[in-house]
Image (cartoon, rainbow, N blue to C red):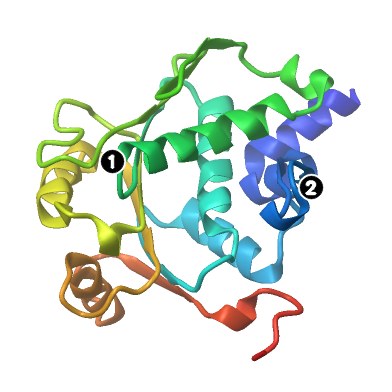
């Protein structure tokens, strides 16, 4: 009975699933370690925005755990919904594969009793993860024709302001989610001469349909000016 109740809570609220059951890598300065993904208020706010808005753009400071957060969101989507296709992009293939690794790491660290309530994993490659419910995650190189052949449920583009082919990637990917899929663009700032800045300004001015989220350095609890 408890397992059924907890499953229902996770199904209803990805923030609850993340805060209660996801375990992430610990700080690199401490060597190989893991810590519970206990969400800060700002992270809860972002997760709820992801659940409520189809087009999201996030301008963030460094080391706020937002890449881990969107990976947890993607994991929840795959585990609790059927037939979802998640596409991951970053500055390069290695960085995109790192996002996939984080999704896998959080899945591997879930409690065994919860895994028994979830679809079993059917595939676990460096650049592709799949579950028995038909949901899958693919990490792809951010080339000019990236993702064009897919119909995506969710597209995540990390460090979008630093992509070499940002405009071409965006133009190739955007149609893949126009049937009702979701896109999350996130990045630290990289000046004004890039598509991320252009889309951010349009979102702030409410002219392109994107929900803008700004996360400053002080959003991390305990962080001081020093």
Depth check, mark 1 against mark 2: the one in front is 2
Which x, y percent locates residue 102?
57, 38
- Give x and y (percent) for residue 14: 63, 45
Q: Which residue is mark 1?
A: 180
Q: Residue at x 26, y 36 (%)?
A: 141
Image quadrant occupied by the C terminus: bottom right
Specify whether 169 is left or right of 177: left
Frontmost residue, 7 versus 204: 204
Residue at coordinates 29% horizontally, 33% vertically from top-left?
140
Side of 112 where 70 appears, left or right: left
Q: In the rendered image, which residue does mark 2 sit on? A: 35
Q: CA distance from mark 1 to mark 2?
A: 35 Å
Q: Position of residue 73 (x, y in %)?
A: 54, 44
C-beta proximity under 8 Å, tags 1 and 2:
no
- Using a 10 Å C-alpha cutoff, classify the residue at mark 1 as few (fewer than 14 neighbours), some (14 to 19) or many (20 or more): few
Question: In which quadrant of the rendered view does residue 34 lie?
Answer: top right
Q: Residue 84 shows which numbered tag?
A: none
Which SS class for mark 2?
Answer: strand
At horizontal 42% and vertical 34% (from top left) the residue drawn is 97
């Amino acid at each position: 009975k408890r397992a059924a109740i907890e499953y229902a809570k996770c199904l209803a609220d990805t923030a609850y699933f993340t805060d209660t059951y996801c375990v992430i890598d610990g700080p690199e300065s401490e060597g190989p370690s893991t810590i519970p993904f206990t969400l800060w208020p700002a992270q809860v706010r972002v997760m709820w925005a992801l659940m409520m808005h189809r087009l999201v753009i996030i301008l963030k400071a460094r080391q706020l755990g937002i890449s881990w957060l969107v990976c947890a969101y993607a994991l929840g989507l795959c585990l609790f919904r059927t037939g979802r296709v998640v596409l991951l992009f970053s500055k390069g293939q290695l960085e995109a594969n790192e996002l996939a690794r984080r999704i896998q790491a959080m899945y591997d660290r879930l409690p065994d009793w919860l895994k028994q309530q979830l679809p079993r994993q059917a595939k676990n490659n460096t650049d592709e993860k799949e579950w028995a419910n038909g949901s899958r995650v693919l990490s792809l190189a951010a080339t000019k024709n990236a993702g064009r052949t897919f119909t995506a449920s969710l597209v995540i583009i990390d460090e979008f302001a630093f992509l070499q082919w940002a405009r071409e990637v965006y133009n190739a990917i955007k149609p893949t989610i126009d049937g009702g899929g979701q896109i999350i663009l996130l990045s630290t700032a990289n000046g004004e001469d890039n598509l991320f800045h252009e889309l951010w300004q349009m979102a702030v001015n409410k002219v392109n349909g994107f929900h803008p989220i700004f996360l400053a350095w002080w959003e991390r609890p305990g962080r001081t000016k020093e």
